[in-house]
Amino acid sequence: MKSIKIPQMVKCIAFTFVLATITVAVMAQTGDGAAGIEEATSKVKSYFSVGTKLMYAIGAVVGIVGAIKVFNKWNSGDQDTNKVAAAWFGSCIFLVVVATVLQSFFGV
């Protein structure tokens, strides 16, 4: 097969046309960027309290399951009860602290 040679000028014109078309399409979609950022900020802030409550709920479930686990180990006389109790208590404190710190850090 023989390849067809396209002159350099036609390539430049086609490339310029493609860039102009892309630029017009992008400019048509952007609109007011500040309004979009403000809307995104308000939506994230509205979801943040729900996420914090979800973290507290997960902490409560982990706390109940961990308390049952520690109670069973304590009743069976296992030697590593202190280690399991410390891990359980630490995970509950971590979830509460993370939720509170994130809430105060983002000012929500």
Image: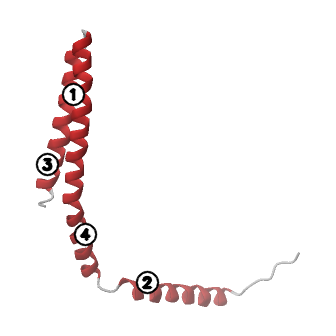
Q: Nearer the viewer, mark 4 or mark 3?
A: 4
Tell me which amino acid carries mark 4. Lys
Q: Nearer the viewer, mark 3 or mark 2?
A: 3
Disc 3: which residue: 101
Q: Residue 43 has which mark?
A: 4
Tell me which amino acid carries mark 2. Val
Q: Identify the mark nearer the N-term, 4 or 3.
A: 4
Spot occupied by residue 73 in the image (x, y as percentages of width and height): 26, 16
Disc 1: which residue: 67
Q: CA distance from mark 1 to mark 2?
A: 56 Å
What residue is at 19 percent from the left and 46 percent from the top?
Answer: 56
Spot occupied by residue 107 in the image (x, y as percentages of width and height): 11, 60
Q: Identify the mark nearer the N-term, 4 or 1.
A: 4
Q: Secondary structure at mark 4?
A: helix
Q: Secondary structure at mark 1?
A: helix
Spot occupied by residue 5 in the image (x, y as percentages of width and height): 77, 83
